[in-house]
Image (tube, rainbow, N blue to C red):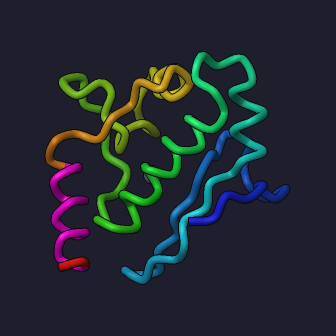
Amino acid sequence: MNIVNAGPKVSPNTYGMTTDFIGIYLTPKVYANNIANAFSDALADFTSIVGTVGAHELTHRITHIKDLPYNPNVPNDLMSVDDNPHGFTLLGNNELRLTLDEGLLLQQDCVKKHR
Ligand SMILES: [Zn+2]
């Protein structure tokens, strides 16, 4: 994962990106400048938000879970943050989490690669 500044073609509301071309995943990016600009008044500090966005992008990269639709039964799901009406506030308050299933999927993939 690379922590970089977004260029002028990237929306200021984009905090990270994981590009895949038909299942070939590129190294995820986290956009430090966009996060610094958008969350200057946030409760959580800059590094926490960078870490949360990084966890979201690495979960895409490692598990191939896509951005999920918002589910009111799991209102703080890290992988549905893009569709969550309160996503910005939750990210700024450091209140997003992987669900148990997402965490297990991440763990299974790591265990497979490191035994
Ligand atoms: Zn995403």
Q: Residue furthest front?
A: 115
From the viewer's perspective, is residue 115 above or below residue 19? Answer: below
Would residue 69 be found to the left or right of residue 35 on screen?
Answer: left
Q: Position of residue 64 (x, y in %)?
A: 31, 66
Q: Residue at x 72, y 30 (%)?
A: 38
Position of 58 with respect to 2 (left or right) is left
Q: Nearer the viewer, residue 114 or 5?
A: 114
How would you classify the magenta stretch by its main secondary structure?
Answer: helix
Per the image, is 81 magenta?
no
Q: Position of residue 33 (x, y in %)?
A: 78, 45
Residue 66's quadrant in the figure?
bottom left
The residue located at (30%, 59%) in the rendering is 65
Residue at the far right in the pictured view: 8
Please state the horizontal and vertical placement of residue 80, each as a whole percent of the image. 36, 40
Quadrant where the N terminus sits is: bottom right
Above or below residue 82? Residue 2 is below
Give the magenta-colored segment's residue range: 102-113
Q: Is residue 103 magenta?
A: yes
Examine the rendered structure and indicate whether residue 100 appears above or below residue 24.
above
Residue located 53% across and 44% down the image: 51
Image quadrant occupied by the C terminus: bottom left
Q: Residue 52: x percent and y percent?
A: 49, 41
Instruction: Find residue 25 and report its image quarter.
Output: bottom left
Q: Residue at x 40, y 67 (%)?
A: 61
